[in-house]
Amino acid sequence: MVPGAITEADRHNIRGEHISVDTIPLVGEMPLAAAVRDVRAQGLLVVSLNMAGSVPDAADLVVTDPVQAGVMTVMAVADTAKFTVERLTRRVF
């Protein structure tokens, strides 16, 4: 997910945006699911890879390919992109 996000962020930053990519290492089903609920409660977008466990059910968007997940995430937060999660008819890719 990170390589796709970094590449897409670089493309937008060249155009004058200021998008940075950061990761948070979390381990364990319960801490991860709790973190997703907390992050979403703050109004932040949660994109999950398609995986076992409860996180995909709690995420805003679930993507199988990690590079595509990173690209879609950056596109969702970029000011110059036309991609919005709210307009999607499905949430799993």
Image (cartoon, rainbow, N blue to C red):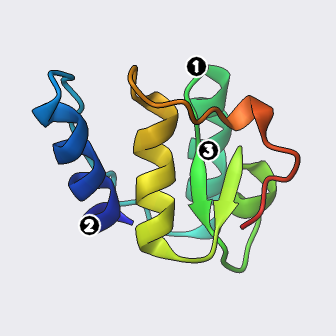
Image-based side of 5 in relation to 7, left or right: right
Rounded to the nearest whole Å, what is the CA distance between mark 1 and mark 2? 25 Å
The foreground one among 4 and 50 is 4
Amino acid type of the residue tagged 1 in the rendering: Gln
Image-based side of 26 in relation to 93, left or right: left
Residue 42, disc: 1
Disc on the earlier residue, 1 or 2: 2
- The C terminus lies in which quarter of the figure? bottom right
Of circles 1 and 2, which is in front?
2
Of circles 3 and 2, which is in front?
2
In the rendered image, which residue does mark 2 sit on? 3
Rounded to the nearest whole Å, what is the CA distance between mark 3 and mark 2? 21 Å
Question: Does dot 3 land on a helix, a strand or a loop?
Answer: helix
Image-based side of 6 in relation to 62, left or right: left
Please give the name of the residue rendered at 76% of the width and 30% of the height, measured from the top-left corner.
86
The crowd level at tag 3 (other Cα within 10 Å; few <14, some 14-19, many 20+) is many
Find residue 18 and report its image quarter.
top left
- Image position of 14 with respect to 66: above or below: above
The foreground one among 3 and 31 is 3
